[in-house]
Structures are given as structure tokens and as C-alpha cells.
Amino acid sequence: MSKKTRYSDKELQEFKTLIEEKIEKANADLELLKSTYMNNGNNGTEDTAPTFKAFEEGSETMSKEANTQLAIRQEKFIRDLKNALIRIENKTYGVCRVTGNLINKKRLFLVPHATLSIEAKNMQK
């Protein structure tokens, strides 16, 4: 029996559906993050003591920075998922870029944008 070198078209279609669903959810999450850190809404601090207002503004700044970082990570995640769709179209999806072996199907369902097998990840350590 020869060793399998790529996933079947049917399997690739399963992964494509999974990835498209993840992209849709990730885009919704990204929009939520963006609306949070772009929100200039007034939180009603104009009539509070100056000390509390300063704390509120400091907290708001830290929150915007954290949300910006989360948005950047989310954009990278979406980009990685879209790259996985390209690999599906090229029929190279699920092939480890280091070992050339198929990445375990369970791993791909958990991390659909993975380009390394567990063996290759362990070699990096």
C-alpha cells in the first residue's frame, strides 16, 4: 500500500467548509473588536470627580491598546485561514512544509491553518 501524499478532494472540501465557517466567525469577532477600540462614545464621566475621570481614561487607553493587539492577532488569524484556502485550491493543504508528510487530520480540525506536523513542531524546540 502506498503512502498517502495528499488529502482527497472530499476531505479537502470538508476542510474548506470548516475554514470558511471559521473565517466568517473570525471576521465577526474582528468587527466587534474594531468597534470596541474605535468607540468614542461618552461613558458619562463628565460629572464625576477628576480623579475617577483620570482612572477611567487610563483604563480606556489600556483597553483600546489591548483591543488593538487582539484585532491585529485576529487579522493574522484570518490571513492564515485564507492562505489555507489557497492551499486547498492548490491541493497542497495538510502537507507539512518541513517533513512533506500529511499533517494529522485531528490537528487540522483543531488548527485548520497549520502548516507543520506535530513532528516538525517538536523539531523546532
Image (spheres, grey):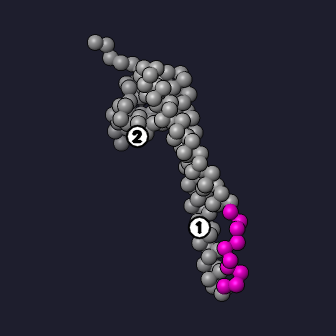
Three-letter code, disc 1: Met
Image quarter hosting the C terminus: top left
Which residue is disc 1 drawn over?
62
Q: Earlier in the sequence, mark 2 or mark 1?
A: 1
* x then y, percent, for residue 21: 52, 39
Disc number lying in front (2 or 1): 2
Label 2 and label 1: CA atoms lie apart by 31 Å
* x then y, percent, for residue 8: 42, 20
Please report the bounds of the magenta region as a residue range.
39-48
Residue drawn where x is 57% and y is 42% of the image: 24
Which residue is disc 2 drawn over?
110
Image mark for residue 84: none
Residue drawn where x is 70% and y is 84% of the image: 47
Give the main secondary structure, helix, strand or loop, of the magenta stretch.
loop
Image quarter hosting the N terminus: top left
Identify the secondary structure beneath mark 1.
helix
In front of the other: 72 or 11: 11
* View extreme (bottom): residue: 49
Q: Is residue 16 above or below residue 49?
A: above
